[in-house]
Amino acid sequence: MTDESLAARVAALEERVARLETGSDVARDDVFWALEELRRRVTGSGQVLFTGAVDLPTGEHYEWQQGAVADGLLAADWSAHAAPYAALGHPVRLTLLRAVLRGIRSAAELQETAALNTTGQLYHHLKQLTAAGWLQAEGRGQYRVPAGRVVPLLVLLSAVVPADMTTGE
């Protein structure tokens, strides 16, 4: 390595250190800031993390973070946790959940929003969602997504919704 190329590398490193110290380094750390922090904290064979801060149209604010050790997830019996995923596997149920997060809470409004012909159809879907923990009955015919399920639900949806729909691009 020549003195000139070594000097250029040192100058580039000094510039990067200066950007890091001032917080102006917008390279990998900006794009993968959560991943970089997880890497600093990770132990064993790895971890997964999901997190979010959400302001709903209803004015409610939720913050949530949950992590898991990869070994534990890979060793777990996934089939024992199929019911919550199965409850999400119907377009009407997803429509109901989206409506509740947007502020439609009454059974009558939910029935209209989901374009269901009978209350029997509505309550069939509501029962599936409440049994799986995605909805909670509040008062008479009122429903809400439990606080501990708001961000996880949005994380699951963000895993399958095309990126251009979630980023606004």
Image (cartoon, rainbow, N blue to C red):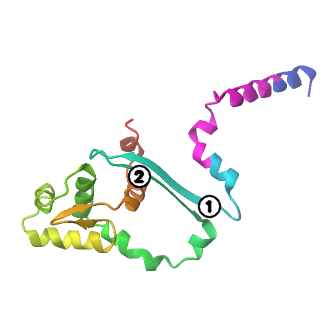
Number of numbered tags placed on the structure image: 2
* Left or right relative to 82: residue 74: right
Q: Which numbered disc covers residue 47? A: 1
Q: Quadrant of residue 159?
A: bottom left
Q: Quadrant of residue 129?
A: bottom left
Q: Nearer the viewer, residue 16 or 126?
A: 126
Magenta residue span: 11-35
* Left or right relative to 91: residue 22: right
Q: Quadrant of the N terminus?
A: top right
- The residue wearing badge 2 is 158
Above or below, comparing residue 38 to residue 140 in the picture? above
Tell me the crowding category of disc 2: few under 14, some 14 to 19, or many 20 or more residues within 10 angstroms, Cα based: some
Tell me which amino acid carries mark 2.
Ser
| Marks 1 and 2 in Cβ contact (< 8 Å) | no
Q: Secondary structure at mark 2?
A: helix
Question: Is 157 within the magenta?
Answer: no
Q: Quadrant of the C terminus?
A: top left
Question: How far across and how far down the image is residue 126, in percent?
Answer: 22, 69
Q: Residue at x 92, y 24 (%)?
A: 2
Above or below, comparing residue 82 to residue 112 in the picture? below
Tell me which amino acid carries mark 1.
Gln
Q: CA distance from mark 1 to mark 2?
A: 19 Å
Question: How far across and how far down the image is residue 42, in percent?
Answer: 68, 57
Q: Nearer the viewer, residue 147 or 90?
A: 147
Q: Main secondary structure of the magenta part?
A: helix
* Left or right relative to 10: residue 124: left
Which residue, as the protein is rendered here, is positioned at the far left? 117
Q: Residue at x 36, y 75 (%)?
A: 83
Q: Which numbered disc covers residue 166? A: none
Above or below, comparing residue 33 to residue 48 in the picture? above
Which residue, as the protein is rendered here, is positioned at the far top? 4
